[in-house]
Structure formats: C-alpha cells, structure tokens
Image: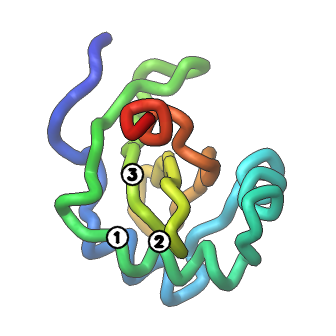
C-alpha cells in the first residue's frame, strides 16, 4: 500500500483524546520524547494543539498494513518534531508510535 495525503483519524478527536488522557505513547516514543527534552505532559500539550496544516501523511503500519498511522510534523519549542500515531477501531484511544526530532526537516533547512 502507498501513503495517503488525507488523515485516517479525525484530528479534532485526536486533540480531544490528548486532553482527556486517551493518548498513550509507546515505550520508544516516550524515550525519544525525553531525549529531545519533552515530558509526557508536554507531549500531550503538543498533540492537543496539532492543526490541519501540521498533517504530513497517513501511512500503513509496517507490521499490519491494514492499520493506518497518521504522521504530523510540527515545530514545538523551536524543535522540528515528527509525530506518528494510530487509533483503535472504536476511536476511543490513540497510541503515539513516534515523537522524535524530525531530522528530515533539519536537513531541508541546511
């Protein structure tokens, strides 16, 4: 499958889920967030404020191509951040698979 240019999940619902503590980070995403200086509270704040113009692509999961993951790129505290998440089928919970420095954005600015 190829990437899509439209989100798979409602951004409004994702923003709300972040505010209601229904977004959880994987261990790897949590570690990456801490490495670039973000606490879990700060990660939640960034996700709750994502906007439509921050959307980058929707891509199938490597492990299960029927599961789509939305990718957003945003500057948070002056740091280019790559955020990737997926939702459960009911839309009640979301998992952040990635929250890391967006090195592609850095390379483009060099």
Q: Residues within 10 Å of mark 1 (few under 14, many from 20)?
A: some
Q: Nearer the viewer, residue 96 or 109?
A: 109
Kindly identify which residue carries mark 2: 47
Crowd class of label 3 (few under 14; some 14 to 19; many from 20; radius 10 Å) = many
Q: Place residue 21 in its image quadrant.
A: bottom right
Disc 1 or 3, which lies upstream in sequence? 1
Whichever of labels 2 and 3 marks the residue nearer the N terminus, that label is 2
Give the x, y percent position of residue 46.
49, 75
Name the residue rendered at 39%, 51% in the picture: 73
Residue occupying image coordinates x 52% and y 54%: 81
Question: Residue pushed farthest top?
Answer: 1
Quadrant in which the N terminus appears: top left
Q: Residue 16: x and y, percent?
A: 39, 83
Above-or-below relation of 72 to 15 = above
x, y percent for residue 70:
37, 44
Q: Which one is closest to the eye, mark 1 or mark 3?
A: 3
- What residue did someone put label 1 on? 50
Viewer-nearest residue: 16 or 100: 100
Q: Is residue 96 left or right of residue 66?
A: right
Which residue position holds label 3?
Answer: 73
SS class, disc 3: strand
Outermost residue to the bottom: 20
What residue sits 23% from the left and 47% below the top? 7
Circles 2 and 1: CB atoms closer than 8 Å: yes
Q: Where 31 sits versus 19, above or below?
A: above
From the image, which quarter does the C terminus lie in?
A: top left
Vertical side of 64 occupied by 1: above or below: above
């Amino acid at each position: 499958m190829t990437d899509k240019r439209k989100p798979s999940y409602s951004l409004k619902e994702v923003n709300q889920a972040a505010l209601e503590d229904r977004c959880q980070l994987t261990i790897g995403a949590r570690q990456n967030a801490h490495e670039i200086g973000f606490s879990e509270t700060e990660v939640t704040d960034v996700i709750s404020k994502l906007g439509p113009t921050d959307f980058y692509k929707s891509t199938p999961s490597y492990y299960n191509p029927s599961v789509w993951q939305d990718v957003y790129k945003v500057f948070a505290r002056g740091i280019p951040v790559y955020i990737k998440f997926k939702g459960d089928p009911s839309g009640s919970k979301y998992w952040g698979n990635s929250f890391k420095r967006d090195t592609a954005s850095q390379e483009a600015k060099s």
